[in-house]
Amino acid sequence: MTSSSSTATARTSSEARAVARTQTLIKGENGIGTVRKTTLPGGLCIVTETLPSVRSATFGIWAHVGSRDETPALNGATHYLEHLLFKGTNRRSALDISSAIDAVGGEMNAFTAKEYTCYYARVLDTDLPLAIDVVCDMLTGSLIREDDVNVERGAILEEIAMTEDDPGDCVHDLFAHTMLGDTPLGRPVLGTVDTVNALTADRIRRFYRKHYDPTHLVVAAAGNVDHNKVVRQVRAAFEKAGALKQPDATPIAPRDGSRSIRTAGRVELLGRKTEQAHIVLGMPGLARTDDRRWALGVLNTALGGGMSSRLFQEVREKRGLAYSVYSYTSGFADCGLFGVYAGCRPSQVHDVLKLCRDELDQVAEHGLSDDEIRRAIGQLRGSTVLGLEDTGALMNRIGKSELCWGEQMSVDDMLTRIAEVTPDDVREVAREVLGQRPSLSVIGPLKDKQASRLHEAVA
């Protein structure tokens, strides 16, 4: 198959075959870091990044479905389905799927988020055809038998229980609910005990058929890979399964929208007998497509992204009030969240909240110093590169970029965008984001008097 920046290529056989469109999205030096994309008839998109210097490859399939695509009655269906695709196909049992990858020393897994799901396998480059065949078989030929649904229900209920036993994790789900309420984005990815118990094999099968059409999928491979070979192998696997039925179909576009979060001053407390109180203080952030996300990334790094950050220095280093304290951002297609997390002794909750709120207000009003911004830019640039040092990270980057943005950005371009952030950019986004009235989520053993004072932190 030949390719160029916008070359249409056709494969011929004993009978006419539809045309596949191939593009070079990022041209690397001597082929290193080259990102290419082919769209097959049937609407399946395949992107690869070539890194000939490694001996491994990571292959993944991203599905354009997450927990935000669920109705209240289907909450947890996306994650449930993620589990079930490992339970067997017409060609392989669950044991066959896992043993095939184990036999070559590879690793295989999946994850579900609010806006997408990903299935992947990391193997030696010579075993990439096997990984492609196994993962494609799972995605196109899952049986979703009633017996498997009933067995896996117990595993998922245990996963929910495990999450609830970790308040440092659970508090982020609580914060999403505090900010977004009983909406698809505000509900937990895992679902609840009630919704998981109510899901049936028939309902999950219908959900599978609706959301796992080739037009809803992005195939991504990174490492010592040959783009044309990956395309041929993926195409053969999908055609063998009869999945490319509509030659004129096109991939669905990335999500968009204009959802706004107007929540301010809300407080949610979940009483638990824990040794620590776990808190998230936050407000609406930015959508992942907002151009100001680069400035927000610098702000987040300086405020709570490392040991030299303001929050770490003020809360932990100077006063020893918390072991873990940090800030973070969550960007969705049409909105975002900004949060500050801390875990502390229940008796210290109000001191920690006051310190965090004071820092947010201080940065919103006066901004960060130029030194803090320069340090944050350097830290963010370094962590960006170091985070892309393995084939799994590269596969995640190109797959998520294609699914969520519909475009690819080279690492050099990303570093340039970070370096171009100015102190004024950071101060402006700080005023806009941190200047909003926050909301608060808390999990812990707070007494009535302590709980009644929580509203002071968001007043």
Image (cartoon, rainbow, N blue to C red):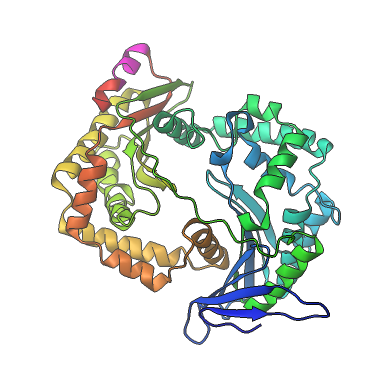
Q: Residue at x 72, y 69 (%)?
A: 235
Which of 32/184 is in front? 184
Which of 45/181 is in front? 45
- State left or right for residue 115 relative to residue 202: left
Which of 72/28 is in front? 72
Rendered location of residue 281, percent (x, y): 33, 34
Image quarter for residue 39?
bottom right
- State left or right for residue 325 relative to residue 181: left
- State left or right for residue 286 relative to residue 1: left
Main SS, magenta region, reads helix
Q: The N terminus lies in which quarter of the figure?
A: bottom right
Rendered location of residue 162, percent (x, y): 60, 33
Rendered location of residue 371, percent (x, y): 18, 59
Image quarter for residue 189?
top right
**For the magenta stretch, what is the residue range?**
448-454
Total numbered badges shown on the rendered structure: 0
User: Does the magenta-highlighted stretch encompass residue 179?
Assistant: no
Q: Is residue 324 above or below residue 86?
A: above
Rendered location of residue 41, percent (x, y): 67, 67
Q: The C terminus lies in which quarter of the figure?
A: top left
